[in-house]
Image: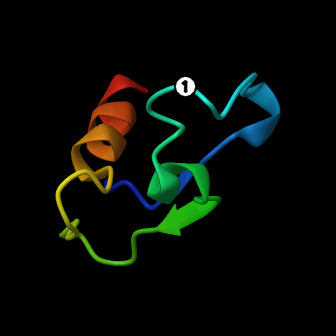
Amino acid sequence: MFLKKVTLLRDSISSFREYPLSIPSIHSMDQIELKKSVTFFVGENGSGKSTLLEGIAEV
């Protein structure tokens, strides 16, 4: 069993001004589909990779 999709539930967010939702890549995200059993998150420092993974792990 693999994670297939991550969806940002915008209706349950009170403010996009606070971290981590203030990170542009997280703020602009609606949904990420993960089509393979192994997924790589690649991006520049500060782009939200670790924050996204921590959020997934939390839920």
Does residue 33 appear left or right of residue 54 in this picture? right
Q: Please tell me which residue is depicted at 50% across the width and 65% down the height of the picture.
A: 32
Horizontal and vertical percent position of residue 51 = 31, 39
Return the residue at label 1: 18
Q: Please tell me which residue is depicted at 29% across the width and 77% down the height of the picture.
A: 36
**Which element type, helix, strand or loop, lies under badge 1?**
loop
Residue lying furthest front: 17
Horizontal and vertical percent position of residue 38 = 18, 70
From the image, which quarter does the C terminus lie in?
top left
Closest to the observer, 15 or 53? 15
The local crowd at label 1, few if under 14, some if 14 to 19, many if 20 or more residues have their Cα within 10 Å, is few
Identity, as a three-letter code, of the amino acid under mark 1: Glu
Does residue 44 appear left or right of residue 22 in this picture? left
Q: Please tell me which residue is depicted at 70% across the width and 40% down the height of the picture.
A: 9
Horizontal and vertical percent position of residue 22 = 53, 39
Q: Relative to 48, say whether 36 is above or below.
A: below
Horizontal and vertical percent position of residue 49 = 26, 53
From the image, which quarter does the N terminus lie in?
bottom left
